Image (tube, helix red, strand yellow):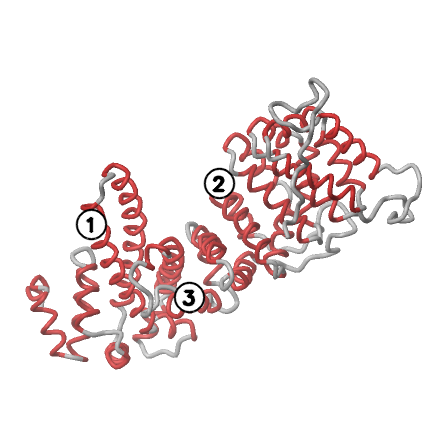
Amino acid sequence: MDRNPSPPSSEAEEEGDAVGNTVYSKHWLFSILTRLIEVISPEKTEPGVSPEGIQTELDEEMENDICKVWDMSMDEDVALFLQEFNAPDIFMGVFAKSKCPRLTEICVGILGNMACFQDICMSISKDENLGQVLLQRLCDSDSPTLLETSRLLLTCLSQPEVASVWVERIRENPSVYDCVCFIMSSSTNVELLVKVGEVVDKLFDLDEELMLNWIKNGTCRAVGPSVDDSPEELPDFKIVPCILEAAKQVRSDNPEGLDVYMHILQLLTTVDEGIQAIVQAPDGGKETWSLLYDLICHELCQPDDPPIIVQEQKTVLASILSVLSAMFASQSEQEYIKMRKSNVKLPFSCYFILDMPLIGSLIRILQYMEGCGKRSVDNSKDSEQQETGRADLNEEDFHLKILKDICCELLSNMLQELTKENTLEGLHQGHLNEQTCSCAFQNLLPLYFTSVESFLEVLREADQTLADNLEKRFPSLKVHA
């Protein structure tokens, strides 16, 4: 069953009663707004009303009518009418006085629909009082209200004319960080987690300063003004564990949501503070690495998938590999590799960094991309709509090139650090053979010549015959043998 009833087939019989070019009645809409005011300012106590005189539940008729307004507000003429008759101010009164979660949810949802239109969005965004009240809704304990609030924020952040207003407002409200982290770390509502993730992703993409502030945050603080349905005190949140917890919740049910949270992690690695927040966690980054490793080695782009799967998963793969590459580089900077070569016992994190199944997965991604490349060329030759086909192909090639560049960088760094023991393990497990090594060399040369040369020297110790065969296939390596 649909959440909201269909809008009424309104009959605006009186001349001039129609809202814009619609068939909706101004009189009917105005009557609903009037009843809404009465709901939050009752003159007498009625059933379903709390001792304080504020209604805690909507009667069925009122809920149906206000839901019709919610659906109708997707029409620009209706949205403009609601704006003209100060609906946002009425909704402000609802947020301030209502103890009815369903009513609050619907009013935020109507505002979210109205914000889809640029002029109204600018008016809503520039109203400082309304902006502050809406941010306070992130402290709500009602998941549907949180979902509609997140949708409204994402709509506003997606409009360039007002995005900076909301970024600045959020930056000045520490409670937003706490409430968002609380949702990511504790909610099991996948739809809500995805939408909150999209808000965080947009914020970090828009403003590096805000991202840096959130990375550095972690002190316990009060959650804005006292509201009955907000947590009294929130724990000492750190952004990375909260992102990981949300990613674990959405990974099985919502691939798009996983993509969002992996991109958030990737954005964190664009600043040194973000990388340090990941690798200098109490577990040394083990939880982050383990999650991303599991996704790459056991869920995405698997051996029984068709090669074209890499086209579908290219953005999430690129985000994951970017984070793994940044973590690997950071570990190298901390001289973990030097410790390993000196036979010093290392933390667990350094052992799983050189895990052979990951190298096998990186090579498989490159193999699948080669298959996609051949398919794209064949399709472009057969395409009758050449210009459209070429534009689509260029976009596909662009994203695949990004994925290939990231994959090659990580693979080259890992191959360069392999020991004879690692290599023997890879040969035994089937991750390294002539076919996979040839694919790796084909993609790494000539840019990563030093890494390939270093790996080939180790390979000679493990399997001389395979090393000789590879030298024959790649003559440029013989010169330096």
Label 2 SS? helix
The percent coordinates of residue 151 (x first, y second) are 59, 44
Classify mark 3: helix, strand or loop: helix
Q: Residue 115's x, y, as percent?
A: 60, 34
Q: Position of residue 232 (x, y in %)?
A: 75, 55
Front residue (pair 392, 207): 392
Up/down of 360 relative to 429, above or below:
above
Left/right placement of residue 129 relative to residue 118 reads right
Position of residue 206 in the picture relative to residue 408 (left or right): right
Whether residue 146 is visible here, answered yes or no, is yes
Foreground pick, 137 / 14:
14
- Please tell me which of labels 3 and 2 falls first in the chain: 2
Say whether marks 1 and 3 touch (CB < 8 Å).
Answer: no
Residue under label 2, please give it: 206
- Give residue 295's mark: 3
Q: Secondary structure at mark 1?
A: helix
C-alpha span from label 1 to label 2:
36 Å
Q: Is there a contact, CB below 8 Å, between mark 3 and mark 2?
A: no
Q: Is residue 273 visible?
A: no
Q: Which mark is residue 377?
A: 1
Amino acid identity at mark 1? Val
Residue type indicated by callout 3: Leu
